[in-house]
Amino acid sequence: MTLRDLRGQPAAREMLEVALSTGRVHHAYRFEGPAGVGKEVAAFGLAQALVCTSGDPLGCGACNACRRAVTFSEREPTVPLHPDVIVVEQGLYPESVIGRDEKMGVSVEQIRRVVLAHVAFAPAEGRARVFIFRRADELPPQAANALLKTLEEPRPATHFILMTSRPDKLLPTIRSRSLLVRFG
């Protein structure tokens, strides 16, 4: 599955395809729209295109990097096998990884250990490192604030995709640092 497989969202798809084709991919996108309209397909399609090793700006879907970007671990069924595609979500990582149980949202500790610890380094394999935030509206203010500086000035080849069906729940500072892509 690639970005080409996104259906029913012509404006969002065209915006992302133009960015990829021209090499002008923004460092932080905010995918807004109701649940179930293709935000996640678009997020993983964009991630796939950014780590693709075949040279196809939209992602070939066939190379090892493309396949691993959308193939998930058997142990953690929502964590991609590609080391440069990192998913951030409440309750996704065990307490042994982030140091605490997350019942109330993504913790500051998860931002520190999963995002900030990795963002300082170049991509491990791909051309880019991509952080996908599922339900970014569930970021508590403390976690969102811990992310702000990195979201504003990431290192080269680092991209953030924040998905939300409730954009009004995001901090204005998070919204101002990301480029809106609407999904209907």
Image (cartoon, rainbow, N blue to C red):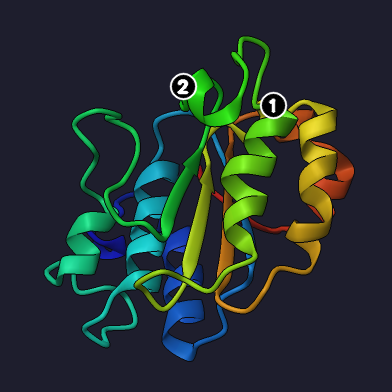
95 with respect to 53 (left or right)? right
Element type where label 2 sits in the image: loop
Q: Position of residue 61 (x, y in %)?
A: 18, 66
- Between 184 and 23, the one lying in front of the other is 23
Q: Position of residue 44 (x, y in %)?
A: 36, 53
132 with respect to 107 (left or right)? left
150 with respect to 16 (left or right)? right
Which residue is drawn at the image coordinates 69% and 26% (left, top)?
107
Q: In the image as oriented, which residue stretches furthest toward the top?
A: 103
Which residue is drawn at the image coordinates 51% and 78% (left, top)?
19
Q: Which residue is mark 1?
A: 107
Q: Where residue 94 is drawn, which disc sits there?
A: 2
Name the mark nearer the viewer: 2 or 1: 2
Please report whichever mark, 2 or 1, sits nearer to the chain's N-terminal start: 2
- Can the viewer see residue 6? yes
Three-letter amino acid code of the residue under disc 1: Ser
